[in-house]
Image (cartoon, helix red, strand yellow):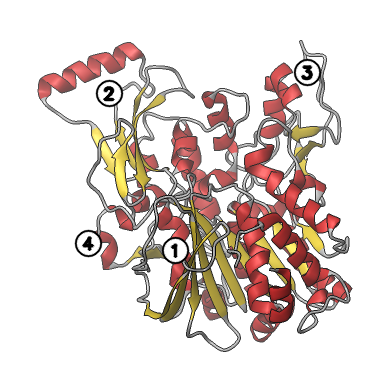
Amino acid sequence: MRGPNAHPILAATLLIGALCINGGELSGDYSKLSGIIIPGFASTQLRAWSILDCPYSPLDFNPLDLVWLDTTKLLSAVNCWLKCMTLDPYNQTDHPECKSRPDSGLSAITELDPGYITGPLSSVWKEWIKWCIEFGMDANAIIAVPYDWRLSPSKLEERDLYFHKLKLTFETAHKLRGGPSIVFAHSLGNNVFRYFLEWLKLEIAPKRYMQWLDEHIHAYFAVGSPLLGSVETIKATLSGFTFGVPVSEGTARLMFNSFGSSIWMLPFSKYCRTDNVYWKHFSDGSRKNHHVYQCDEREYKSNYSGWPTDIVNVEIPSVRGVAYPSILDVAQANLSTMECGLSTQLSFSAHEISDGTFFKAIEDYDPDSKRLLHQLYKSYHDDPVLNPLTPWDRPPLKNIFCIYGIDMKTEVGYYFAPSGKPYPDNWIITDIIYEIEGSLYSRSGNQIEGNPGATSGDETVPYHSLSWCKNWLGPRVNITRAPQLEHDGSDVQVHLNVEHHHEEDIVPNMTRSPRVKYITYYEDSESLPGRRTAVWELDKERAHEMKPLAYMVHYYAYFFVDMDLYINLY
C-alpha cells in the first residue's frame, strides 16, 4: 500500500488529467471542471508601463519591461527600479516617473526570476502547470488570475476592476467548459478570494448569491492561508523583509510600507469583529459609517489576544522633542532611564496592532506610523465591503480543503529597540520569539512563558493563524493520520466521530514516530447537506513547498473521482 504522498508529482498529474481531460472515465461529468489559480503575495510579475531613463546605468525601463522581478536592472539601477515599484503611501498612485502593472495569464505566475525567489514564491505553479500540460490537460482548463499584490483590496477594484474581472472569469469558464471551477488560492490569494466573496454579495441579488456560488465554484483549496494574519508582517513593517531580493532591509522597508497591501496580513484577534456590512447596506441604504470594531469579553480576559505571546515588544526612546533620535540621544536616554529606574519597553497584542494602538504609540518616533495608520483606517477598518482584519467564518461553498504545513520553527513575536541610525533603519530587532513544536523559545534558545499551540506553523505563518480553518469543521470530525512516504498501512491511525467544539483546537491523541513525517486529515463526519470541509496538516512542510499543491488534487480524487479509477492509479 502506498501513502498519500508516495509519488506526489505523478499522483497529482494523473489525477488532474483524469479530472480535466474530456472523455475521462469519471463518475459524473468532472471533465467540465476548470481550475482557477489566485497567487500569493509577490507571486505575480509586474511590468513597466512607462519610459524611464536611468542615469548612470546602461539599462532603462521601457513599456512591458519586467520590473518584478528583474534582478539585473535592480542591481544596476536600484533607484529607477524603486520608482517603478513603490506607490504613494496615502493614495496608492504610481510614482510620477514610472508605473507598473501586473502581467496576465499563466506566464505571470509561473516564474519571476530564476536563481533568486522563483523557488519560494512561484515555482510551485510552474511545476504544477507543467505536470498538467505533460498529461494533456486542455489549455482552457486552468486559468490564472494575477493581480497587483501591492494594492489594498478596495484599490484593486477601484483601479483595475479586479473583482469584476474575476467574476467574469468564473462565468466565462463555466460557459466555456460547461461546469463550475475549482479555486486554488495560496497565501495572500486566500485573502483576495475572501474579499471577492463579500464583494459579490453586493453585486448580485441576495436570492441569486448562493445559486451563483453553487453554479460557479465546486471546491476551494486554501493553501498556507494566513487566516488570522502573519507576524512577519510586523518585521517587514518596522525593519524590512527582503523576500530574497538583493536589496537592503531598509530599502525593502521603504518599498513594503508604500504598498496598501502591507496592512492586509497584519495579525489580529479572533475575538474582535465588525458589524455585518451586508445587512447594513440593506437596512440603511448607506455605505458610510458602517463599521463598528468590537471585541467580546474573551479578548480582555485572555492573554495575548489568543496568540502564543505578545506580537511586539518595543523600547520607546525617552527623548522629548526628538522624533527620530541619534545614537547619542538614545544612549543618553538609556542612561537617564537607568538612573531613574524607569522602563520604556511596551508590549502590544495582536488586537492592539490591528486596531492601530501600536502605531499610535510609536508615531512620534517613526515617520511610517502616520502613513500606516492612514492606510489601516481608510483601506481596512473603513472599507465599504469588508474589514479584512476580522476572523473569517466558513465560506458558503460546497467543498473546502484547508492545507498547511506544521512543525516548522516559526516567528511569533519580536523585541525592537532604536538602532541609533536614521530612518528607514531606525529600528533593530533585539530578540525573536519562535514557536517550535508546541513550545516557545527566544532567539538565544531559552524557553519562555506564553500560550503555545499544540504545534508550530509553516515557518512563515504561525499555527494559530493557519489552523483557524479547523473552526470550519462540524461538531463531529473524522481524523486520519498516515506517513507521507511509502508504507504498508500498519502505521495508519483513524479516529471517528471525534467531538469538536467551536474555536477550540482539535489535537488528536495519536502516536507519532520522531523519524516519520505524517499527514493528518480532519474531515467532517457530520456536515450540512452538500457541504464538505477538510483540513490537512503536513508535517515539516514549509509555506512555499510544492507538495501541498500535489496533495490538493491527489486527495481531491479520493472524494470525487470514481473509486475504481482511484484504486487503479494507486
Left/right placement of residue 432 relative to residue 277 reads left
Question: Mark 2–mark 4 contact, CB under 8 Å?
Answer: no
Task: Classify the position of the N terminus by image quarter.
Answer: bottom right
- Amino acid identity at mark 4: Lys
Q: CA distance from mark 3 to mark 2?
A: 42 Å
Query: Which dot marks residue 468?
Result: 1
Mark 1 secondary-structure assignment: helix
Name the foreground residue: 309 vs 456: 456
The 10 Å Cα crowd at callout 2, few under 14, some 14 to 19, many 20 or more, is few
Residue at 36%, 41% in the rendered image: 434
The residue carrying mark 3 is: 54
Distance from Cα at disc 3 to Cα at disc 4: 56 Å
Q: Position of residue 383 (x, y in %)?
A: 55, 59
Q: Spatial distance from mark 3 to mark 1, Cα to Cα?
A: 47 Å
Dividing the image into 4 quarters, which one contains the C terminus? bottom right
Between discs 4 and 1, the one toward the N terminus: 4
Of badges 3 and 1, the one in the foreground is 1
Q: Are marks 3 and 2 in contact (CB under 8 Å)?
A: no
